[in-house]
Image (tube, rainbow, N blue to C red):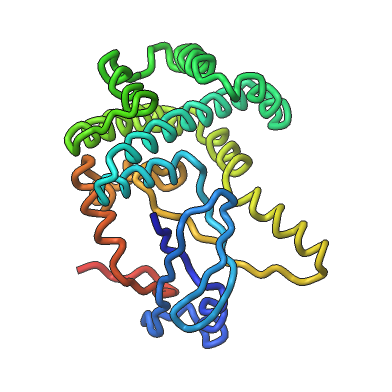
Amino acid sequence: MLLDLICFDCLMEQVKKGAPHSTGADPILTPFEPVNESGIYTVNCPNGHTSTTIIHNINFEILFEYGINGLADEYFREAVSSFTSATERYYEFCIKVLLRSSGLEFNKIARVWKLISNQSERQLGGYVILFSQAFKEEPILLTNKEVSFRNSVIHKGYFPNKNEAIEFGNSSMQIIETSLIKLKEKFPTQVEETFDFFGYKRKAEELLDKKEKETGEEQNFACVNIMTALDVMHGREININDGRNGDMKMQIERVLRRRLPRKLTLLKDLPELD
């Protein structure tokens, strides 16, 4: 999976030229880089620059997008594994948001999570209990058949076919998105705070700040939000015409389109729609 990022040097060159423009002149070529764990990317853009970009996302968003890319490339075992990881990391996010809503500070939330961080069954139990308490209903979960399928893929080396992997992706998307929308509607402040604290951006900024203090060299960087199918801060549910709408087959088509060469334009005003 490649992320479409932005080059800090190209961005600054456009700013020096007076961007953002009302006309949308001088588009910037979009560089692509493979996913990493830190959220910090060394970008080598088509104009010959080498710069740093960080992403403003959280892990389950990227993991789920990774799964869609696996489907697009017909790596079906990897897709199922990524959807599974994304769902588990969403449970973690939801638990932390609900603990935050009870008034816990993030350092205490981190300590509480550490007690169950290596025990997936306890994490699932914590998610079910806290969700049910907050929303007075049971959360949507995988069916017994889906759990058996997942375990066969993850633990027994089963090779799923395309339809099986797509169906599992659709189920995982429903589980996460249905819960996430409820979470954003009832606890918008805590969702944003938790996203900011446990997302890639804060951690990346801390690492770059540490590097700057150690080397004495200023660490300039650009920041970009990767538009993922499951999106905490800019969810597709906001706009019925969002290009990320649709089931897993439509998500595959979207991912394939986004791999094509593209350009970014810095606009001063919103473009007029016909």
Left or right of 123 on screen, residue 114: right
Left or right of 97 on screen, residue 234: left
Q: Residue at x 75, y 61 (%)?
A: 211
Number of callouts: 0
Q: Where in the figure is residue 205, as x and y percent of width and height? A: 67, 55
Q: Residue at x 49, y 11 (%)?
A: 129
Q: Residue at x 38, y 30 (%)?
A: 176
Q: Is residue 61 above or below residue 256?
A: above
Left or right of 108 on screen, residue 23: left
Q: Farthest residue to the bottom: give it.
A: 17
Q: Where in the figure is residue 174, as x and y percent of width and height? A: 30, 30
Quarter of the figure with residue 143: top left
**Quadrant in the picture for the C terminus:** bottom left
**Quadrant in the picture for the N terminus:** bottom left
**Residue sitting nearer the eye, 37 or 17:** 37
**Residue sitting nearer the eye, 84 or 126:** 84
**Residue sitting nearer the eye, 91 or 235:** 91
Q: Where in the figure is residue 201, as x and y percent of width and height? A: 60, 51
Q: Where in the figure is residue 123, as x and y percent of width and height? A: 52, 19
Q: Farthest residue to the front: give it.
A: 157
**Residue sitting nearer the eye, 191 or 208:** 208
Q: Residue at x 44, y 46 (%)?
A: 62
Quarter of the figure with residue 9: bottom right
Q: Is residue 76 above or below residue 48?
A: above
Left or right of 259 on screen, residue 225: right
